[in-house]
Amino acid sequence: MAAKTKSAALKPANQKSIRQKVIRYLRKYQMDVFDVDFDANGRLFLEEMRKGLAGRKSTLEMIPTYLEVEADVPVGQRVIVADAGGTNFRAATVIFDEQKQPIIENLKIYPMPGVEREVSADEFFRVMAGYLQEIGTASDRLGFCFSYPVEMFPNKDGRLLRFSKEIKAPSVIGCMIGRRLNEALVAAGVGEKHIVLLNDTVATLLAGRGYKNRIFEGIIGFILGTGTNCCYIEKNSNILKKKDLDPDRSQIVNTESGGFGRCHRGKIDIRFDKSTINPGSQKFEKMISGAYLGPLLGMVVQQACEDGLFSPPASAGLARLENLTTTEMNHFLEHPYGSGRLAEAVREGTAEDVQILYGLSDRLTERAAKLSAVNLSSAALQSGQGKDPTRPICIVAEGTTFYKMKTLKSRIEFYLKDYLEDKKYIYTEIVRVENATLVGAAIAGLTN
């Protein structure tokens, strides 16, 4: 008979007591999933959405995009697409076939200017124009997915508000992105293009149009990767801060939901926020997204070590951990007795230590799922759509955290069903579209 190891399974009674111990610890700091009241946080989210739409002070920017979704996608017409992300710049051409399925051609990936070193605004746009030279004659239209907060204008251009990722190009802030890119394209000999600017969340929403010829009543775009954001289709009559809109039409509104600042936050959330490079901003994002979930767990674990939640050997190992990542957190959830810094740190402790660490990681993940569902539910309710179960709202979701974090997606779906479907009679379906940002940028470039 094989010898028992320290990682042998505990008796069911002990497992129950460990769960209770984890919950008591998290609730002491108001960090548990039970501390998040879904109704209360949803009401606050909707309040912030409506204040943002009215132009009142709000932690949700609610940026009108001037992009509509009703226009038909033309068949056989090629469009240039570009996708400027946090690390890479992708360039390609896209054409839709007779079945209105996208065909992506000439795809190339380049380093995003401003990642390795600081660049001026002139260099920033000159480098991007250079990336587009090879395909510059393919079309006079360009759909430009620019994954940063911009103030949009009716001509489909936008002024950069800030860089939310590690791009070092401060002089680009305040620039009209499409206009400056066109100037660089002309200087490069490519010629001026009809540029339609949009961010990655809006592109993700547009990619859901015509998904597998399904009939949906509305569409929501949702990103949960390094960061998070959400957009939806809003009636112009509800966008009170813009006085010149046709009240009978609708458009996509970018909520910039990562900035939601009125959600429930625990004591360690507040302490963690103060430790980041941008304290006081992106409070919601710091509770759910890939850039922050792992580091947040690290602070929760360090406090647990100080509070004596772990045995001395495990506590000694965990206390030495620095710069914990969400990837490492997820690896531990998938392989609690495997390799990885978290698993190795508790290996000299007891099986109870492993289960406590697993419980902390798992409940922070579930809390992220619950908060994500608050975001999506609020967008669905504000849209006024999805009341017919045969024509649900299509949620087009993107992001490695959403799809790769253990149990996150299934738990978001659980909370959406529990709250939206069972209590509000609003129906949704989550879908994934391959190359969503490129496809959405193509649709924007061809239809606006």
Image: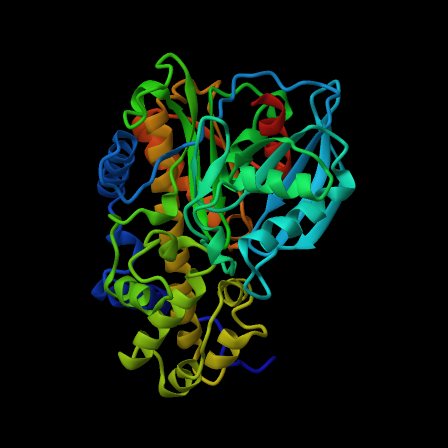
Extreme residue in the front direction: 187
Residue 233, percent from left and from top:
42, 26
Q: What residue sits 47% from the left and 50% below the top?
A: 408
The reply, left or right, for residue 194 in relation to residue 427 is right
The reply, left or right, for residue 45 in relation to residue 256 is left
Q: In which quadrant of the rendered image does the C terminus lie?
A: top right
Residue 160 in view in this figure: yes
Q: In the rendered view, tell whether residue 133 sits above or below residue 120.
A: above
Residue 320, percent from left and from top:
43, 84
Q: In the rendered view, tell whether residue 1 sits above or below residue 298.
A: below
Front residue of this view, candidates 28 and 271: 271
- Looking at the picture, the colour scheme in use is rainbow
Residue 17 in view in this figure: no
Front residue of this view, candidates 249 and 216: 249
Residue 115, percent from left and from top:
58, 61
The reply, left or right, for residue 80 in relation to residue 115 is right
Residue 251, percent from left and from top:
43, 24
Q: In the rendered view, tell whether residue 409 sits above or below residue 364.
A: above
Front residue of this view, candidates 299 and 262: 262
